[in-house]
Amino acid sequence: MGLIILDDLPELVIAEGIHMRAVTAESLTVAHVKIAAGSLLPEHSHPNEQVVNVMEGELEMVVDGQTHNLTRGKVLVLPSNVIHSGRASTDCLVVDVFHPAREDFKGSSFDGYPGE
């Protein structure tokens, strides 16, 4: 692998108002996510560890029933299989890191979260 141009990657729709481009390496995925104000990330879990980095905006994340208000400089580390959801208070730019790599983000479309 080498240089990747984000704009050349397919834009995946994660949920209404949530669009992402994912860079997938052998053992991790880095997701560049744009979230429109008011958009909801449905409650879900996955086997991947996740590190949520808010680069711009304010994102409210609920993890196992506990609310975390994330802004630039606050990083949330989610263990594998933990139930979480989110809501953008403002337009957001988020960089998520997943380990191991998200197989479901490798293609040109995303099938959505269970229960949507």
Image (cartoon, grey):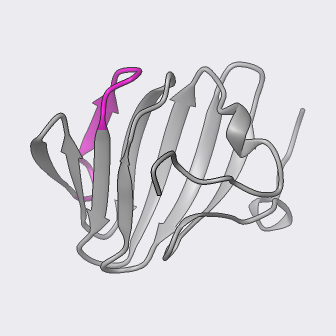
Report the magenta stretch's main SS.
loop
Q: Is residue 91 above or below residue 86?
A: below
Residue toward you, 89 or 55: 89
Taking the view exactly as shown, the residue that stands out farthest to the right is: 1
User: Is-magenta flag for residue 11?
Assistant: no
Q: Residue at x 53, y 60 (%)?
A: 33
x then y, percent, for residue 99: 56, 23
Image-based side of 78 in relation to 31, left or right: left
Taking the view exactly as shown, the residue that stands out farthest to the left is: 66
Taking the view exactly as shown, the residue that stands out farthest to the front is: 115
Q: Residue at x 64, y 26 (%)?
A: 28
Residue toward you, 100 or 111: 111
Residue toward you, 30 or 13: 13
Where, by quadrant of the figure, is residue 86 drawn? Answer: bottom left
Q: Residue at x 78, y 68 (%)?
A: 7
Q: Is residue 25 above or below residue 94?
A: above
The quadrant the N terminus occupies is top right
x then y, percent, for residue 2: 88, 37
Where, by quadrant of the figure, is residue 45 drawn? Answer: top left
x then y, percent, for residue 6: 75, 60
Where, by quadrant of the figure, is residue 94 drawn? Answer: bottom left
Image-based side of 65 in relation to 114, left or right: left
Q: Is residue 98 above or below residue 13?
A: above
Residue interval drawn in magenta? 71-83
Q: Is residue 25 above or below residue 13?
A: above
Image-based side of 16 in relation to 92, left or right: right
x then y, percent, for residue 16: 50, 74
